Image (cartoon, rainbow, N blue to C red):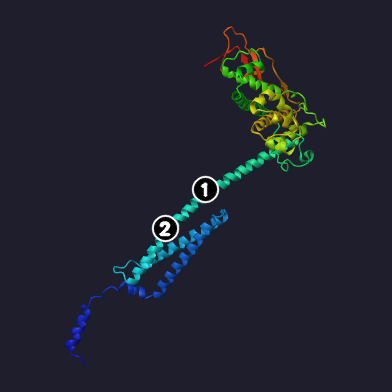
Amino acid sequence: MQPTGTRDTQLRDSNNQKVHPQPMEEATNQNPGAVETLISKIFTNLSSLKSAYIQLQAAHTPYDPDKIQEADKLVISELKTLSELKHFYRENNPKPACVSPQDSRLAAEIQEQQSLLKTYEVMVKKFQSEIQNKDSEILQLQQQIQDANLKRTKLEKNLKLRGLSAKESGSSGEQNGFSPVDLNPDLFTSAVETAYRAIHDFSKPLINMMKAAGWDLDAAANSIEPDVVYAKRAHKKYAFESHICQRMFSGFQQVSFSVKQENPTVTKESLFHQYLALREMDPLDAVGQNPDSDFGIFCRSKYPVVVHPKMEASFFGNLDQRNYIMGGGHPRTPFYQAFLKLAKSIWLLHRLAYSFDPSVKVFQVKRGSEFSEVYMESVVKNVVMDEDDQKPKVGLMVMPGFWIGGSVIQCRVYLTGVKVAE
């Protein structure tokens, strides 16, 4: 039995003893299984996040919108899960005053994974932005396809109204590679502009080759149409354009266009079919595939009358190209290819003119005719009229005019004896 003093002393010491808070690591160690489970979930979640991110990258090559959206949702879901685990750990494990080595390692691992998480979040935002841009592009393309389909339906309907159904043409326009077009005055007006540009474009190399060969351009212009008074020397180019035009449009008022055909019976539908067949083709390919087609014969008949033999001999030193064409061939020389572009534009204009019902009529004006603003258009825009109010006279007809229905497409003329404003 212990002495009373001794026991009282022990009781007093026990009553005076301070109670210290339990260290964090001891509290954690009370349920080590929960911590291990949490860490296991974190690593499992990170593994799933990496897998989802790889799926997101793979969905971009090749670009698959459905797979991208599916992978994007999966990445976001894994990010949310990881965020929930982070908040759960912080709520149940407040930061201790003293951190054990085990907690330090765990904190370092968490910090590393958080840094990786931020990297994934940046990449996901980048991919989400790319997805939005791609979705916008897809919507625009879908709208363009829808508009194109509506336009195509309308044009095909117009073609059928003109009698060019699949049955009449022997096969569908799409099978033949034709682009459906609407046969209307605007189409013909556009073809007239194309023909006029082609005349202008062919005159350029022709004049340049004449200069290189030493031709007297003043004398050459005067031989085409004598005694024309030009406001500027540079305006003599219109004489050569007029020469080309007169030769190319000769016979335009005939349905055959001066081409002898084995079957002279043609219909407006067949003429429009010829227009469509050549419209999208390179003219050299057209004559190469069928040298003796109506278009091929037309080219061979027009080249000799547009390009004089003396002119050609001075250009090339011989008449080999001319003889080759006259013999039924179509040379692949740059000069002849430039001529073929001109011939194609005039031929298409003729085929189109006779596709209308009633047919388009061509008209021209003679030199010396008074200028009429109704039927004529000056190729020089800044002309100054005489003070005596006399109407200027036509010096050259550069491009004929046309009657289409009740409308007039003015012929283009060069006015003589007028001044040009500077």
Position of residue 273 in the picture relative to residue 213 (left or right): right
Secondary structure under the numbered disc 2 in the rendered image: helix
| The quadrant where residue 369 appears | top right
Residue depicted at x 73% and y 23%: 250
The image quadrant that residue 380 belongs to is top right
Residue 243, position in %: x, y?
Answer: 67, 21
CA gap, disc 1 to disc 2?
23 Å
Q: Left or right: where does residue 15 sit relative to residue 60? A: left
Q: Is residue 409 visible?
A: no
**Residue under the image location 57 percent in, 17 percent down:** 233
Crowding near the residue tagged with mark 1, few <14, some 14–19, many ≥20 C-alpha atoms within 10 Å: few
Q: Amino acid at mark 1?
A: Asn
Question: In the picture shown, does residue 353 fall above or below 111?
Answer: above
Residue 20 or 65: which is nearer the viewer? 65
- Per the image, label 1 sits on a secondary structure element best described as helix
Sequence-wise first label, 1 or 2: 2
Q: Quadrant of the N terminus?
A: bottom left
Residue drawn at (57%, 44%) of the image: 140
Give the residue pinned by disc 2: 118
Image mark for residue 152: none
Q: Quadrant of residue 61?
A: bottom right
Near mark 2 (Cα within 10 A), the count class, few <14, some 14-19 or many ≥20, is few
